[in-house]
Image (spheres, rainbow, N blue to C red):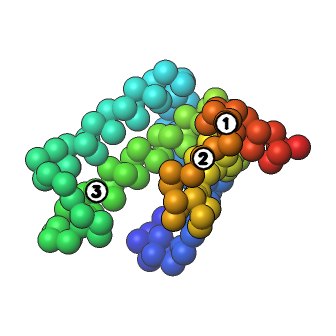
Amino acid sequence: MTREAVAEISSVSLDLLKTKMAEFAKERNWDRFHSPRNLLLAMVGEVGELSEIFQWKGEVPKGLPGWEEEEKVHLGEELSDVLLYLVRLSHICGIDLGKAALRKLQLNAIKYPAPSAAAANNYSNTNNGATNTEKLEQKATSILN
């Protein structure tokens, strides 16, 4: 794919990445090496490379002000390596990563509900005798039923 073609893509789906990664591996006869374990270890290595970019920078503000364009390009490459291994790993394991991520967001919304306006204004409100765990279970039950 040319740079121009990549630049024209406004939104890339996980399915497209999955297909491209499968084609890439097949063309190189790499399927035999792409076991879940090997892909996970490769991804961990890429996370290490990603970590090195931030290693000595201290706290970095959003938007990366002061970073050179070359640093941002390098960051994009390492983020992409992690993403591509994750997509390939999920494909090899038979996990629909998009659906799994959406499900996880729903579970997190139950586990970590956004505070209501009243609760945000008065965080010390009483919980009417119910423990946090009981309240979470009640809310999850009401949402999932």
Which image quarter is the C terminus in? top right
Residues at marks 1 and 2, CA–CA distance in whole angstroms = 8 Å
Where is residue 26 drawn, in percent x and y? 57, 39
Residue at 40% in and 52% down: 80
Along the line of sight, the residue nearer the viewer: 21 or 52: 52
Where is residue 137 drawn, in percent x and y? 73, 35
Q: Are marks 1 and 2 in contact (CB under 8 Å)?
A: yes
Instruction: Give the foreground label among 2 and 3.
Output: 2
Amino acid type shown at disc 3: Leu
Amino acid type shown at disc 1: Gly
Vertical placement of residue 64 versus 17, above or below: below
Where is residue 14 drawn, in percent x and y? 61, 54
Q: Are marks 1 and 3 in contact (CB under 8 Å)?
A: no
**One can see residue 96 in this view:** no
User: Where does label 2 land, which residue?
Assistant: 126
Amino acid type shown at disc 2: Thr
Along the line of sight, the residue nearer the viewer: 21 or 51: 51
User: Where does label 3 land, which residue?
Assistant: 75
Label total for image: 3
User: Where does label 1 land, which residue?
Assistant: 129
| Helix, strand or loop for disc 3 | helix
Res 10 → quadrant: bottom right
Res 127 → quadrant: top right
For residue 120, which numbered disc appears in the image? none
